[in-house]
Image (tube, rainbow, N blue to C red):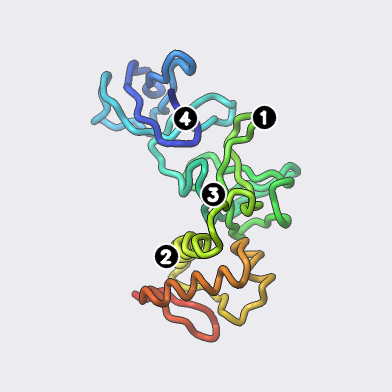
Amino acid sequence: MITLGKYNTLRIVKRVDFGLYLDGGTESGEVLLPQRFVTPAMHIGDEIEVFLYLDHEERLTATTERPLATVGEFAYLECTWTNEYGAFLKWGLQKDLFCPFREQKQRMERGHTYYVYVMEDSKTHRLMATAKVERYQKTTGRQRALDFAEILLRYLYENDGYCNLSDHSPADDISARFGVSKKAYKQAVGDLYRRHLITISDDGIRLNR
């Protein structure tokens, strides 16, 4: 059985001009891997690992691209554009991840980044993001801080090793950018500092190179 929004290992069953068809099982049938993701090393009968999502026409589609997060995971994603229904976040696939207004804590803005949870909409079965992450964080406060430390570390790697939020930054600024409390932010910073991964200064934190 295949799983939407996750990595699946599927067997190549057919080659066509516009890609490869993979065996999705009796329920899903054949799943297209578009030609742009096909490599010379792929042959009929081979099993390959692919990520499954719905394309712009709501068709089940495979890709060898690797998103920044899969269903059930948290990630820090940049908003690339918005429309009258919500925001679209860059997450590593050609098709951006949608976050409807009802799942936003505040109106997302293009160029800003947000801490979100990736999920499958129970009604439409489309993949989507929610910024209302608290309902999915069932671990202890300390564990959440450790989890967020990894998100913060990835943010530093993706932003030239610098974050301009310090221990003294307003809680609202921290929440707006990362969707966590000031306490959780300080705990994560402390964890990274104890691991000798960052340097703390009055104007923010920097990744140790």
Marks counted in the figure total 4
**Mark 1 or mark 3: which comes first in sequence?**
3
**Mark 4 or mark 3: which comes first in sequence?**
4
**Of the pair 94 and 77, the residue shown nearer to us:** 77
Q: Which mark is residue 157?
A: 2
Q: CA distance from mark 4 to mark 1?
A: 16 Å
Measured as percent of width and height from the top left, residue 72 is found at 52, 43
**Mark 3 or mark 2: which comes first in sequence?**
3
Quadrant of the image for the C terminus? bottom left
**Mark 1 or mark 2: which comes first in sequence?**
1
- Amino acid at the residue labelled 4: Thr
The answer to whether marks 4 and 3 mark residues whose Cβ atoms lie closer than 8 Å is no
Measured as percent of width and height from the top left, residue 104 is found at 70, 51
The answer to whether marks 1 and 3 mark residues whose Cβ atoms lie closer than 8 Å is no
Q: CA distance from mark 4 to mark 3?
A: 21 Å
Please tell me how crowded label 2 is: few (under 14), some (14-19), or many (20+) other residues with Cα within 10 Å. few
* Residue under pointer 3: 90
* Residue under pointer 4: 3
- Amino acid at the residue labelled 3: Lys
Please tell me how crowded label 1 is: few (under 14), some (14-19), or many (20+) other residues with Cα within 10 Å. few
- Determine whether, in the image, residue 48 is placed left or right of residue 153: left
* Residue under pointer 1: 123
| Residue at 43% over, 23% down | 1
- Determine whether, in the image, residue 95 is placed left or right of residue 19: right
Q: CA distance from mark 2 to mark 4?
A: 30 Å
Q: CA distance from mark 1 to mark 2?
A: 36 Å
